[in-house]
Image (spheres, helix red, strand yellow):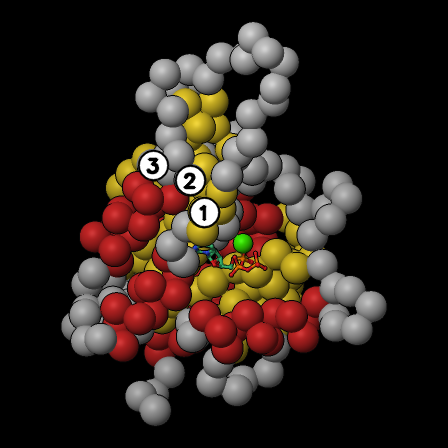
Amino acid sequence: PRAQSEAAPLTGRTVVVTAGGTREALDPVRYLGNRSSGKQGVAVAEAALAAGATVTFIGGAMSVEPPAGADVVRVESTQELHEAVLRHAAGADALVMAAAVADFRPAEYAEAKIKKAQDGTNPVIRLERTPDILADTVAARTAGEPMPGVIVGFGAETGDATTSVLEFGAAKLARKGCEMLVVNQVGRDKVFGQDTTEVTMLFADGREPVAAAGDKADVGVAIVTELAGLLDRPAR
Ligand code: CTP
Ligand code: CA
């Protein structure tokens, strides 16, 4: 059942948006985190709300407020985000993974605050891999679970001497198995915490890449426009 219009192309749709950074606890007072502001995810959620969607916003650590009008779920660790995404994405039409998810977490959690050793030796933090939430959501869908038909990933990339940002992006899109990847170039003072950004959206179905630049709010609208287009595509 769909009631759609130009102004509200996501009417009747449910969209889950993740945003912000995860924090991985070392001990009761310390964590490993990242510089994600949450701004781009909030902008996508606001654009989806403006397009008529029902939005669940799953937010980690952020420097901005979650979007008004969304159902807001707050998480801290990758583990909590993983559980929240699998729970809330079930039955939703689209999932947008704008969260900056830790790739590694401390392999051991110290129940008591880590103290300085009297003998002057320094502690070594051993890390382990976190689950890949995006890839797990795609895998759950492949296994027949009711996961969204449109799954959007983000890819922060820096090119290197032999491979461009977009080549890395195309490889990441294929690796993740999602429908769309929003690629941005990171490094130096680019992107993190800024109000403006420049992205290229890549698609698994072979459609041409779409570039968007400007305020994160404008880029959020551009992402939601492509998302709505993917939801409307005829079944392959
Ligand atoms: N992501 C995720 N779970 C992780 C790591 C990343 O769901 N454990 C999601 C991010 O939210 C993003 C996408 O995967 O939508 C790509 O994240 P990115 O860090 O660019 O890719 P990685 O696969 O972690 O690869 P790398 O950091 O090595 O480039
Ligand atoms: Ca990563």
Find residue 168 and report its image quarter.
Answer: bottom right
Crowding at dot 1, Cα within 10 Å, few <14 / some 14-19 / many 20+, comes out as: few
In this view, 44 is above or below 73: below
Mark 1 or 3, nearer chain start: 3
Three-letter amino acid code at the position of disc 2: Ala
How far across and how far down the image is residue 222, in percent? 54, 62
Residue matched to label 1: 128
Foreground mark, 3 or 2?
Answer: 2
Residue matched to label 2: 107
Residue at the front extreme, as displayed: 119
Residue 47: tell me if it is visible.
Answer: no
Which residue is at a point 67% across and 46% down the rendered structure image? 191
Three-letter amino acid code at the position of disc 3: Val
Task: Work out how far the residue at label 1 is from the one at label 3, CA to CA, in angstroms.
Answer: 20 Å
Residue 204: tell me if it is visible.
Answer: yes
Residue matched to label 3: 75
The residue lying toward the viewer, choosing from 115 and 6, is 115
In the image, taking residue 68 as reference, residue 189 lies left or right, namely right
Labelled pair 2, 1 in contact (Cβ < 8 Å): yes
Which residue is at a point 22% across and 75% down the rendered structure image? 143
The residue lying toward the viewer, choosing from 24 and 100, is 24
Image-quarter location of ligand 2: bottom right
Foreground mark, 1 or 3?
Answer: 1
Please state, as top left, top right, bottom left or bottom right, where the N terminus lies in the image. Answer: bottom left
